[in-house]
Amino acid sequence: MTPLLSLSSLGILLLATHSLALAAPLRAYADNGRVEITGDYRYTYHEPETAADAKRIACTEALHQAVSTSTAVREQTAGLVDHALIKNLVHTLATKHVTDQQILQQSEKGRTVYCKVKALFQADDVERVLLTQTTGGTETAIDQNRALKILSVREDADGTVIIVYKALKRLDWLGTAYQGSLRESADVMVDFYDEQGTLLRSTRYPARRTAGGDDVMNPGEVGTLKVAKPLNTKTFRVWLVK
């Protein structure tokens, strides 16, 4: 009986050692901020496109779909209403921040092709790429109070001012506040001036997660405000109510 017990104990020890050997790389994998993502896409092509062109497009869009539906991207873009910005963000992430891309499934039926892919995605890069793409606007005035931080301000091609902000505290509005919750003042001020520096308009905008919404913003969530410039505006200033 003794040899049998020894072999059994040895087997358990080997299994435990093997499990530890597998667990270590998994922890390192998670610490690197990499996650596995999957996406699929169907595409119907027409002349002069070829089947090869269509398959390439389908796999590219499948990867974009995988990135855009990842948890990290959904959390960072939940409050954004600038669809062009989101599209550029996803394209940059899909082309520069994924590795080990693999085609899981590919099919063709008539002129419709299908592609399903998986890849490893550097989720920690999402916020950094978003900040990079939203900087560079004219008359930018970064500001912060205890509840809110302005990440960037830029002027769109049509003259609209795009303001990206992040909640630093949980922001509850009248319709979402509950007993014991934190209710903070989170208002964005936008001042517009004419060529002589005369104030044309000063408007207060409540920071929301969605445009015109009243939903909660949790710490770290990002929102976007789009403000149309009045006529004869030469410069503008964005600041936070303290």
Image (tube, rainbow, N blue to C red):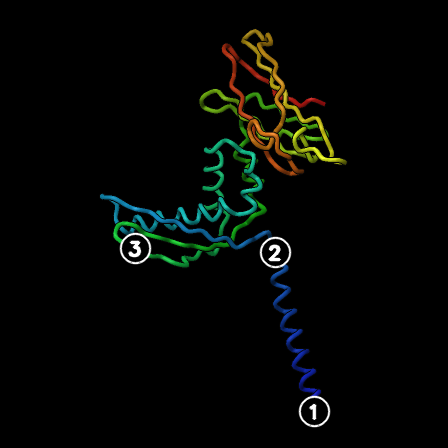
User: What amino acid does circle 3 point to?
Assistant: Glu
Of mark 2 and mark 1, the one earlier in the sequence is: 1
Report how many numbered discs are placed on residues in the image.
3
Local secondary structure at mark 2: helix
Q: Position of residue 208 (x, y in %)?
A: 61, 29
The first of marks 3 and 1 along the sequence is 1
The image shows residue 166, relative to residue 1, as above or below, that is above
Q: Is residue 99 left or right of residue 26?
A: left
Name the amino acid, label 2.
Ala
Q: Which residue is drawn at 72% across and 30% down?
A: 183
Q: What element carries label 3?
A: strand
Q: Name the residue under label 2.
A: 30
Residue at (30%, 55%) from the top-left corner?
108
Mark 3 sits on what residue?
108
Distance Cα–Cα, label 2 vs label 1: 41 Å
Residue at image x 59%, y 7%?
198
Q: Position of residue 41 (x, y in %)?
A: 39, 49
Residue 142 position in % (x across, y down): 63, 26
Q: In which quarter of the image is residue 135?
A: top right
Task: Calculate the distance from the C-alpha at mark 3 to the C-alpha at mark 2.
Answer: 36 Å
Q: Residue reaching furthest left?
A: 47
Closest to the camera, between mark 3 and mark 2, is 3
Percent across and percent down for residue 162 are 53, 26
Q: In this view, does 76 lie above or below 7?
A: above
Which residue position holds label 1? 3
Taking the image as shown, residue 229 lies to the left or right of residue 115, namely right
Q: In this view, does 217 lie to the left or right of 99?
A: right
Sequence order check: which comes first, mark 3 or mark 2?
A: 2
Q: What residue type is labelled 1?
A: Pro
